[in-house]
Amino acid sequence: MLRPDRMSKVSVAGAKPYLKEVVEELHDLNLVHVSDYDGRWEGFDNGTPMEGGEEVSERLVQVRAIESKLDLEPGEFPELSNERYSFTGDRTEELERLEEVRSDVNDLDDQRVELKDRMRELRERQRTLEPFVELDIELDLLRGYESVELRVGTTGDREGVLEALEEASSIQEHDVIGDEVVAVVARTSDGGLGDALAGVDFTELEVPDEKGHPGDLHQELEHEIQDVEDDLDSVEDDLEDIKQRHGAFLLALEEELSIEAQKSEIPLQFATTENSFYAEGWIPTEEVQDLNGALGRAVGDHVEVQELEVAEYDEHGHAVEHGDEEDDEDHEDFEDPPVKQDNPEVAQPFELLVNTVNRPKYTELDPTFVVFLTFPFAFGFMIGDMGYGVLYMLMGAAIYRFVDSDAMKALGVIAIWAGIFTLLFGYLYDDIFGIHLADVGIHLPLAGSFSKGIQAADVAQTWLVASVLFGILHLNTAYVFGIVNHVRHSVKHAVLEYASWMLAINGFFIWVFSRHVAEPKPDFIMGETSVLYENSMFALGFPGFSPEVGVAGLVVAALGAAMVVAGEGIVGALELPANAFGHVLSYLRIMAVLLAKGGMAFVVNLLVFGAYEDNGYIQFGLHESPAATVAAGGADSVAFGGIVWMGVEAGGALLAVAAVAAVLVFVLGHILVLLLGITAAGIQMVRLEYVEFFGKFYEGGGRPFQPFGRQREYTEDGN
Amino acid sequence: MLEALTDPVLLQAAEGLSDEAAENIADIEGQHMANAAAAIAVGLAAIAAGVAEKGIGAAAVGAMAEDPDMFGRGLLMTVIPETLVIFAIVVIFLV
């Protein structure tokens, strides 16, 4: 669970004539991660692709080109998985079909390219005409003058242009036609119109080389564009039609050809001589027998399968003790085993969160299961609302159902888990969209055993302490992981760099929660005023550790700190306050998000229903207007009238307006809180996992286990 | 002005109140001042976190554009300064 699958390195050796059968069998098994042969033995060369490989690759390129022109993605036409294609025999029929589809698609694609070019050209012409439409003068009249100069352009300052023309000494006569698009005509002595216009807001436009009225031309172009668009649509329709008729066939053919290409190229990773081949690869240790059996059945004694080694989980697969430095030279030939994570099915979606940082190395613990235990739990605690919980579950289910990507599907499952815990904690807080069910007369067992602490300081303080305790537990787990990862490699390393931090953190916080030096400590963390002794939700009766235990805690913390300095030197000393204190306090974000999200939902309901204040507590006006409650002596004062009650009081048309406003505020407000909940609770908890938790022990950098083979989706093995 | 609101003697002199009333008002005003101070502390910390994240976020997006696999590490680096605000929240509970 916390370790990846144990891997064995195996070798397969045999005579060349059996190569093809061995490759077929290995591919069908889909179990062996084949290692690359690096040419290290004399006399053994990398193999060559199998016969026919080139033709297969060529055809594969053709099929993929057609798919890209059709915009056909793998994963489309999933209904085909029930009736699979089988490519057997000489495939004349299939190749003919492919050829036909290919020539049709190419023709249509050529037409499409041509039409798109034409469209671009027409649009460009239309665009250059636009200013002239505004000017509304026939294009022929805008050029070809000898005695006067004429320029067309855009300006934002017609007056400025006129002024410049007046002032220019070389201009004898002038006229400006138009408003923003202007035609400037002038009789000049020396062709100085350009100079006169140089200093003013005037951008010259070239007069298009066309004849006629610009408005008509524009209109004509519009018709032409419409025609081209129709043609383009019809070409697209034809392509879509081909896609529907042949899409499944193309995907199946691509799959078959990829498999053949994969098979034909695998000898490149083998070591071969003239008459024999030798391959190495990784396989989960428990599958070695299956590999032996399957190859034995396929080719009998003609190949030799050997389990070369079973990779150990300690550093580099060997117990090496060279002090702190790893001696790389010893491991020149050693190849890290690929990593096949082995988590229970429920926790597997959370591999996404771990692998986003990095895939675990073969030699280290896989923290996925801890993320599975902590992430949805903390998320649910922070949001804690039955209404939001159900919505998160629905959102997750929708992503899982409708998005076709493994990563998104995993995200969907994570959202469902987060929703479940949000629902559970929501039940304990007795909150549905921020409203207590008890307030509307529904009393469920255990509901309301917790509160969010928006209105009660001692509850907020309880969650503050709870967040810190959760943090200490989480960090201890991290250091235990660190110890396990390193203890076999070097006990000294494990103790000085991981156990030392555990001592420092735990010792220090035992002192914090003790009655030693009570005066400066806040009341709520120790003594009979402590929230752990008693708070308005539950009484644990824990008044803090005794002063003696507190002093012992300090001693342990000092010992831990000394070990840290011994292990990590000056850097460790500098890190002490951050890791031992700061990182624990960082978990306060859990309480902070709880209060912030609770507070936002509270405000939304306050606006809609209004609220009255009684003995310092604010209650929503769910049954009658807050003003009525106060008037009847049921409360001290009105906190806010509430949109609903304001409408009721005003009556008539205003009631309708208020009703619409209330629904809008309620729905939009809660959607906002719901979405911000994802970024707040989700990102904050991810951060705690990544920075505070992973940061303590996680290295990552494992290679994914990619066995030679492929899951067939559209085809079945025809051979 | 601040001093006049929180010091009972000055307050008494200014408003001509009884001893007890002056003490009470000073207490209440003092608590308000502390609350306001805490609010300012959180707000400033939030601004500081924002300023710090601005640069990191921009760099992280750049890194992600080069290599989408950087998403996890980019996110991780970007949110590191947020702890500043969390520490400021502790202040609320201590005033």
Image (spheres, grey):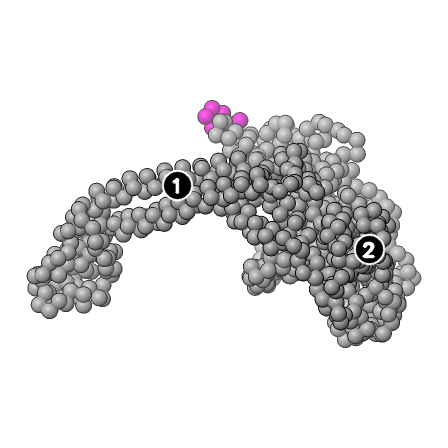
Point out the stretch of residues depicted in magenta: A648-654
Q: Where is residue A163 in the image (x, y as percent from the top left)?
A: 16, 62
Instruction: Look at mark 1 in the image and give the residue it sits on.
Output: A232
Mark 2 is on which residue type?
Val
Horizontally, is A35 left or right of A543 in the view?
Answer: left
Q: Position of residue A36 (x, y in %)?
A: 72, 62
Instruction: Look at mark 2 in the image and give the residue it sits on.
Output: A303
Q: Is mark 2 on a helix, strand or loop?
A: strand
- The residue under the point 76% across, 71% down is A42
Q: Position of residue A621 (x, y in %)?
A: 62, 32
Question: Of A42 and A343, which appears nearest the observer?
Answer: A42
Chain letter for the residue marked with disc 1 in the picture: A
Q: Earlier in the sequence, mark 1 or mark 2?
A: 1
Residue B26: quarter of image: bottom right
Label 1: how many Cα within 10 Å (few below 14, some 14–19, many 20+): many
Chain letter for the residue marked with disc 2 in the picture: A
- How many marks the image carries: the answer is 2
- Measured along the vertical axis of the image, is residue A107 above or below residue A268? above
- The residue under the point 58% across, 41% down is A92
